[in-house]
Amino acid sequence: MKRLRVCFKNRPVGELLAQDGIHYFSYDADWLKAPLPLSPYELPAEAGVTEHRKGCFLALPGLCYDSLPDRFGMAVLRRSFQEQGVQNPTPLQMLSYLGDRTMGALSYEPAGDEAGQTERIDLIQVARSARQLMAHEHGEALDPAIVKAGATAGGMMPKILAAISKDGGEVMTGAQAVPDKMEAWLIKLNTNDKQHSQLIQLEHAYFRMAGAAGLRVPATRLIPDRNGVEHFAIRRFDRSEADPNLRIHTQTYASLAGIDYREPTEDYEDLLRLTKHLTRNHQDVCEQFRRMLFNVLACNRDDHAKNFSFCMDDSAEWTLSPAYDLLFTDNDLGGNWMMVQGKRSAISQDEFARLAELMGISRTAFETIMDEVKEALLQWPDFARQSGTGSGLTKVVNTSIRSMIEQL
């Protein structure tokens, strides 16, 4: 496949061309007559052809790279192609395969023929299939639900996109449209085949704690399968809550700024400045600052540039997306992935305050945000207990959080 049409809500945006490992993009002439700023910094709506070679985006424009899933979803995609005899699918083949089953509001033509019909999910079988894929067990084919829904979901953990009834009793996937009286969710799968999973309950507790800390987070729930094994579900923010079939254009910070998210070179000041310039909304800047404080103090150290996103409405207004991927994590950097004033650890309250001042956040507002985040974090044992987090892990997290707060 050499060419692919990029669309926004069925409206042609432009064309992708692959040649000798390089991708070329040009906007459609009709799009340029009434453009929307889908990627205002890296791919402004202008006539001409742009060339894309950047390895961190598979040599795609960041705008299109965000339509592809991350580690687990890519494994599903590649396995599906291998079962069809294609060992190394190209980026354009993968985008075509996804068609309009992508996250966000972009779609790709010509689309593959794997959309299928809406069908009920057996979470037990789906989790078993995900576990086999993660363990590289190739003895049997992937469960169809993984192929249809797992290949479209971002992130590293095993997950699928699904429609869930409001009471949580019915879970379906396999089609672009969300059936009537159902909602668009993402389900993170418990693949250890036990009723409780350290990560599943831990993430559920972290989202509850983040909400109490004043962060804007999506609705979440723990969904048990028929064996009582719990899976973590989070409502999708790239779909309208009022109409789950209404797609919302969503871009990661990495894509918008052209950042290699795998390199730990970014500073929160850069993210805050982009937030201020893109949204032109002081409340979004304050919210982003609050998320920075939460990530640092709650030891969420997987805070790379793909874990922050922005949403654009049809009137071209950008807003900060709800927070996501909130979890107690660590890395080998000795602190957070993104720096605060050039530091990853041992950041003082005065240093946070200086960054707040740079961003136009008043001292009173800063102190309020800091107090609200700390108050919620000190209640961690209660959130952990309510979500069923194990006592050992609860203690480890509590010790880490209290140590971070004391360092201030």
Image (cartoon, rainbow, N blue to C red):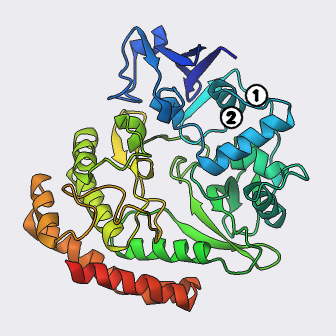
Total marks drawn? 2
Q: Is residue 264 left or right of residue 142?
A: left
The spot of residue 64 in percent (x, y) is 52, 30
Give me the disc on residue 98: 2
Residue 312 appears in the figure:
no
Give me the disc on residue 11: none
Residue sitting at x 51%, y 52%: 237
Q: Is residue 388 left or right of residue 315?
A: right
Instruction: Say what amino acid the circle numbered 1 marks.
Output: Gly
Q: Is residue 362 left or right of residue 204?
A: left
Residue indicated by mark 1: 112
Q: In terms of sequence position, does the residue under pointer 2 or pointer 1 come before the other?
A: 2
Q: Is residue 60 left or right of residue 232?
A: left
Quadrant of the drawing holding the N terminus: top right
The spot of residue 43 in percent (x, y) is 39, 24
Residue sitting at x 31%, y 47%: 265
Residue 199 appears in the figure:
yes
Q: Nearer the viewer, residue 84 or 285?
A: 84
Disc 1, SS? loop
Instruction: Say what amino acid the circle numbered 2 marks.
Output: Leu
Q: Nearer the viewer, residue 219 or 141?
A: 141
Quadrant of the rendered structure where residue 378 is? bottom left
The spot of residue 136 in percent (x, y) is 78, 54
Instruction: Evaluate if marks 2 and 1 touch, with contact meaning CB atoms under 8 Å apart.
Output: yes
Quadrant of the drawing holding the C terminus: bottom left
